[in-house]
Image (cartoon, grey):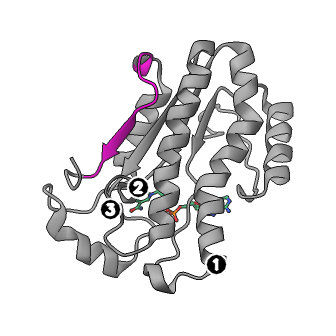
Amino acid sequence: MQQAGRRVLFLETDVSHTENVAQACQQAEKKMGPIDILVNNAGIARSNTMININEADWDAVVDVNLKGIYNTCQALVPGMMERGYGRVVNLSSIAGRRGSLFGDVHYSAAKAGVIGFTKCLARIAGPKGVLCNAVAPGIVKTEILSPEHEAQSQANIPLGRTGRAEEIAAVILFLCAPMSSYITGMVVDVNGGSYM
Ligand SMILES: NC(=O)c1ccc[n+]([C@@H]2O[C@H](COP(=O)([O-])OP(=O)(O)OC[C@H]3O[C@@H](n4cnc5c(N)ncnc54)[C@H](O)[C@@H]3O)[C@@H](O)[C@H]2O)c1
């Protein structure tokens, strides 16, 4: 990216820690200038079925997938609203739309929570020029996807294959670009037809 003439800054932080996120956002804005686009992509899955999910896993999954979005939005969206422009894209999941097929109620609950958060923030921030949408991927070939879950999902995908990360990124890019200027509070399903 730097070779293409872009200014790039990498900062590592745990999105579930409110204070750390606030500091990282402050540092980023100090070095790079105001942030107008926020993509909340961080997520974890601790697959297990309802009766076996322990409290630590419940907390971790909800804290990273849902509280993480609250943390970053609280740090960055007020500035976007003041400046009258911003784009927020939150990663939900097909699990938050139809319920996970694998019993992980913590992940489904967190990802459904992301949708409620997105719609509410869209109402708050829309009048100030900040658009907020969610993307709900289906089964996508990345680190988070176990081979067992990938195999179990195939029969439910009309397009007959696992998705690629670029196919999710393309939709996120669209929601960050000027051409999506009249879309807010929406959930875009990107899942090969598994949930319609
Ligand atoms: N791959 C899929 O099948 C699928 C399906 C639906 C939704 N999603 C969602 O898409 C998003 C991207 O996931 P992915 O598929 O690229 O998986 P991934 O595991 O490859 O990427 C997840 C990223 O989140 C980061 N992360 C995890 N915990 C963090 C924390 N506490 N603080 C900061 N960063 C943290 C990881 O370092 C990693 O870079 C996630 O929100 C995931 O829940 C993925």
Q: Which residue is mark 2?
A: 96
What's the distance in space between the residues labelled 1 and 2, CA to CA? 20 Å
Return the disc, 3 or 2, that comes first in the chain's sequence.
Answer: 2
Q: Determine the secondary structure under disc 3.
A: loop
Q: Determine the secondary structure under disc 2.
A: helix
The residue that appears at 50% across and 29% down in the rendered structure is 176
* Closer mark to the observer between disc 1 and disc 2: 1
Left or right: where 33 falls relative to 175: right
* Magenta-colored span: 180-191
Q: Are marks 1 and 2 in contact (CB under 8 Å)?
A: no
* Closer mark to the observer between disc 3 and disc 1: 1
Q: Name the amino acid type tagged 3.
A: Ile
* Residue 123 place in picture, x, y as percent: 54, 24
Q: Is residue 131 visible?
A: no
* Residue 97 place in picture, x, y as percent: 35, 52
Return the disc, 1 or 2, that comes first in the chain's sequence.
Answer: 1
The residue that appears at 71% across and 55% down in the rendered structure is 15
What's the distance in space between the residues labelled 3 and 2, CA to CA? 13 Å
Of all residues, the one furthest to the front in this rendering is 51
Q: Which residue is mark 1?
A: 55
24 falls in the magenta region: no
Task: Please tell me in which quadrant of the rendered image residue 163 appears.
Answer: bottom left
Left or right: where 113 falls relative to 145: right
Q: Name the amino acid type tagged 1.
A: Glu
Determine whether 176 is above or below 13 in the image.
above
Which mark, by number, is residue 139? 3
Q: Is mark 3 within 8 Å of ligand 1?
A: yes
